[in-house]
Image (cartoon, grey):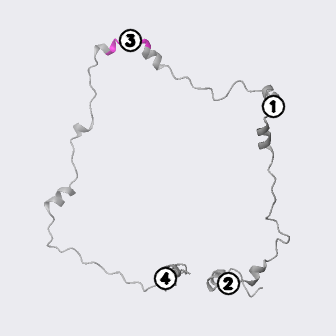
Amino acid sequence: MTSKPASAKTSSRPSKKHEESEKLEWTLTVPMPKKYKVSKRTNNLAKPIRRDVAHLTKQFPTEIPRGVLKHRATKRILELSEPKHVANPFPLNVKANPFVVSPGALKYKASKRTKELAEAREYVNNHTRDDPFGISPAALIAKPKQRIIELAKPKNIHFLPSIF
């Protein structure tokens, strides 16, 4: 018989609830000394970045090449400019009765193997008992361990026992 390590024995048990530790009071921190001098690097990083407004907006070129003004679209460009054919989301050839069986399905003869697979498999249901609410003899003999008893107790009582 192998023994469990000590950590496995104790890890399954819930840890004891510790009472709330006393709350420590807030203490004020010591302010920065007045003789502290900020470094040049910190001052430089703290300054906002100034950018020239002229560089923020790009001006469009005013001159348009003459070749662009006289350009004619080629046959291929016109072909590519056509939208792609998208299938109609609503089919137009909707049958009057969608549940009609096709003639080919009516003429079909199933093979021996298909018929064999189509039959339901027979099996004995062993799960039914004579008395489904009866308690098994093994459960009557069993003695619960301390942990099971501990888990079986309710955590909170939500009803008034004095009424019952």
* Mark found first going from the N terminus, 1 or 3: 3
Q: Amino acid at mark 2?
A: Pro
Mark 3: which secondary structure? loop
The percent coordinates of residue 36 (x first, y second) are 15, 71
- Provide the secondary structure element on which disc 2 rests: loop
Q: Earlier in the sequence, mark 3 or mark 4?
A: 4
Report the amino acid beneath label 3. Answer: Arg
User: Which residue is labeled 4 in the image?
Assistant: 6
Residue at image position (67%, 84%) is 144
Q: Nearer the viewer, mark 4 or mark 2?
A: 4
Quadrant hosting residue 94: top right
Give x and y (percent) for residue 103: 80, 26
Q: Residue at x 17, y 56 (%)?
A: 44
Residue ID for mark 2: 144
**In the rendered structure, are the residues bearing label 3 and label 2 in contact, judged by CB atoms less than 8 Å apart?**
no
The amino acid type of the residue labelled 4 equals Ala
Please tell me which residue is depicted at 21% across the width and 41% down the height of the picture: 52
Residue tagged 1: 109
Q: Percent x, y for residue 55?
A: 23, 37
Q: Nearer the viewer, mark 1 or mark 2?
A: 1
The stretch drawn in magenta includes residue 121: no
- The one nearer the camera, 50 or 70, is 70
**Mark 1 vs 2, N-terminal side:** 1
Question: Mark 3 vs mark 2: which is more N-terminal?
Answer: 3
Q: Characterize the local packing of mark 2: few (<14), some (14-19) or many (20 or more) Cα atoms within 10 angstroms.
A: few
Q: CA distance from mark 4 to mark 1?
A: 69 Å
Q: Which residues are magenta?
A: 68-75
The mark that comes first in sequence, 4 or 1, is 4
> What's under tag 1, amino acid-wise?
Lys
Say whether marks 4 and 2 touch (CB < 8 Å). Answer: no
Residue 72 is labelled as 3
